[in-house]
Every structure is written in structure tokens, then in C-alpha cells.
């Protein structure tokens, strides 16, 4: 992949995830990094209904892509994603979820314990 056309935030985040993964010896951040570096046609998009289906109360999840607002959330979780649609962010906040960017999630949980990848 050519780094010439990659946006600055995606490149910064990929480098951050690589450094944290190497420092703590955690494979989860390397897996998230690999998903973020996919070409545009293979990037991840996750609906709120999928988050609701595959998580339970109090879990910590990371989405290496965009969260969109289709569906409803019935429990509280901590979500870290590359980006959110406006409706998704609104629905998650109304459900009492904590909405973070991946950078914030990595700084809060650098060891990756309890973090689950949703794709």
C-alpha cells in the first residue's frame, strides 16, 4: 500500500498502534492496525445492532473502522472506533455507552486486557 495517499490521522494511528503493540507485547493492537491499513473497499463498517448482538454489559470493544447508526443499543459498553456517524454517536450516548476514538482507547487500555475486536 502506498503511504502517499493515506490520510495523516490513519498513518499516525497505525504508528501509535505498532509502538504500543511492541512495547506491551500485545497482539490485539497489531490486529487493529492491520485492519486500519486495509484499502478503502475493505474497510470495516459496523452497525449498532451488531454491537448489541455480540457484546454484553460493561464490555470494552474496538471497531477498526466506522460505526453507523442502524439498530438500537440495550446495554452499556465502552466503544472505541476510528469514526462514528452522527446517529450512531447519538444512539450510543443515549444508551449510556462510553464513546471513544481508538487513540483514547489505546491510551486507557494499553495492555489490551478485556478489549474485544468487532468487525
Image: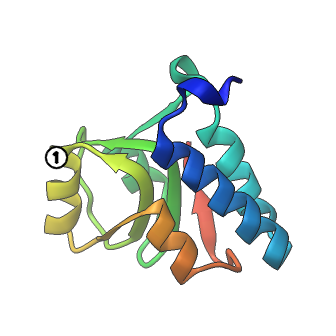
| 39 displayed left or right of 61 | right
Label 1 CA crowd tier, 10 Å (few <14, some 14–19, many 20+): few
**Image-quadrant location for residue 45:** top left
Side of 66 relative to 98 (left or right) = right
Circle 1: element type? helix
- Determine the residue located farthest toward the top in the rendered image: 41
| Residue 73 on image: x %, y % | 26, 58
Q: Is residue 33 left or right of residue 60?
A: right
- Give the vertical position of 71 relative to 60 (above or below): above
> Measuring 58% from the left and 45% from the top, which residue is drawn there?
11
Q: Which residue is mark 1?
A: 86
Residue 46 occupies which quadrant of the picture?
top left
Above or below, comparing residue 77 to residue 87 in the picture: below
**Quadrant location of the C terminus?**
top right
Q: Residue at x 56, y 54 (%)?
A: 13
* Residue at point 53%, 17% (across, down): 41
Q: How many marks?
A: 1
Compared to 17, does 20 lie above or below? below
- Left or right: 90 in relation to 109: left
Amino acid at each position: 500500500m502506498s503511504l502517499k495517499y493515506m490520510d495523516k490521522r490513519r498513518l499516525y494511528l497505525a504508528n501509535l498502534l505498532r509502538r504500543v503493540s511492541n512495547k506491551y507485547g500485545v497482539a490485539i493492537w497489531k490486529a487493529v492496525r492491520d485492519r486500519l491499513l486495509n484499502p478503502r473497499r475493505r474497510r470495516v463498517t459496523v452497525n449498532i445492532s451488531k454491537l448489541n448482538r455480540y457484546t454484553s454489559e460493561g464490555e470494552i470493544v474496538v471497531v477498526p473502522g466506522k460505526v453507523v447508526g442502524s439498530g438500537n443499543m440495550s446495554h452499556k459498553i465502552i466503544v472505541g472506533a476510528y469514526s462514528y456517524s452522527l446517529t450512531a454517536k447519538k444512539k450510543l450516548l443515549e444508551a449510556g455507552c462510553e464513546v471513544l476514538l481508538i487513540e483514547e482507547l489505546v491510551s486507557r487500555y494499553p495492555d489490551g486486557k478485556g478489549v474485544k475486536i468487532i468487525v
